[in-house]
Image: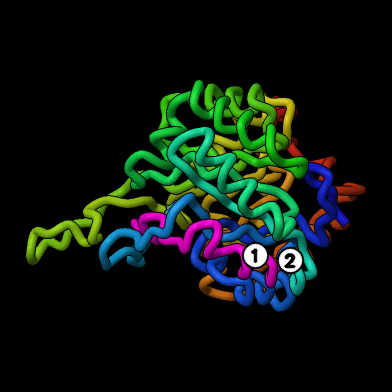
Amino acid sequence: MYTLTGLKLKNPTILAAGVLGTTGASLCRVAREGGAGAVVTKSIGPAPKTGHPNPSMIELDCGFLNAMGLPNPSYPGFLQELEFAKENSDAPVIASIFGGTPSEFSEVAEGLLPAKPDAFELNVSCPHAEGYGAAIGTNPCLVEAVTAAVKDVVNVPVWVKLTPNVADITCIGNAAESGGADAVVAINTVKGMAIDIESGYPVLGNRSGGLSGKAVKPVAVKCVYDLFTALEIPVIGVGGVSSWEDAVEMIMAGAAAVQVGSAVYDRLDIFSEIGKEIEAFLKRKGYSDIKKITGLAHEMV
Ligand code: RRO
């Protein structure tokens, strides 16, 4: 068992917010069949949202480019799904939420409380969500205010998911910590674009979007490395993790736990596989537990 912000996890590998977090059934499946240590929902907001026009997700050689556009049924529309996930998952269920103001964030958090999520993840970092996401997450004052507003109304852990699309992610991490965050999650997707050269059209319906998958792993590792030094609270690493070696790299940069997003579309049991292989690695190297390698790269001078 691993402990993260007071939650007990069977392994340190967590489903990242995304499409598989859209229903209670899919969340449970990732927890039970996939062996995830915890699962995070798709981001839920104050009002129903259809999202950006198709195509909203494309696969590139180096990862996925998406501009889903925060599609969600709103917090009243998601409550039953969250209740189902909570009743049937064998792992903690984290509610990812978004809003356009601190009071919208606290409204959504309060609205989901009846389903008893184990923690909240505040999405202040979607790169293509006018008025939401990075519009908040690139402004330290807003990040602090949003975090404090949610901390005021809930008594479960609050994680804040950060954008890499800033000059210095540690300023934003510091703001989340000042607002009372229990952990930060780094990183959301990296701004990107693809153009079809036959027609000249941008491929995504929204023209631009966010890049995830293998290409972003070095960006995520550097963000986690910097946040580990700057903050007292745990850093949860996410971005391009598709193997146990990637997970260990993220942990050595300073991650207390790791989220997996894009790679789950290849195989659901990636969570149990990475969890098992991390244990085997620790044993082989003679480390008693994961804490012994968390941030290890910082000691190598
Ligand atoms: O729904 C999305 O388009 C989306 C979200 Br909420 C996010 O946080 N990150 C992303 O790349 N896409």
Tag 1–tag 2 contact (CB < 8 Å): yes
Question: Where is residue 155 drawn, in percent x and y?
Answer: 77, 41
User: Is residue 252 at all visible to an observer of this figure?
Assistant: no
Dot 1: element: helix
The residue identified by callout 1 is 82
Cα separation, mark 1 vs mark 2, equals 6 Å
> Residue lying furthest left in this view?
199
Magenta span covers which residues? 64-86
Residue at x 56% of width, y 48% of height: 108
Q: Is residue 128 above or below residue 52?
A: above
Query: Mark 2 near ligand 1 (CB under 8 Å)?
Result: no
Residue 86 showing in the rendered view? yes
Residue name at image x 74 percent, y 56 percent? 116
Label 2 amino acid? Answer: Lys
Disc 2 on helix, strand or loop? helix
Residue 122 horizontal side relative to residue 158, left or right: left
Which mark is drawn over residue 282?
none
Compared to residue 17, the image places residue 110 above or below, namely: above
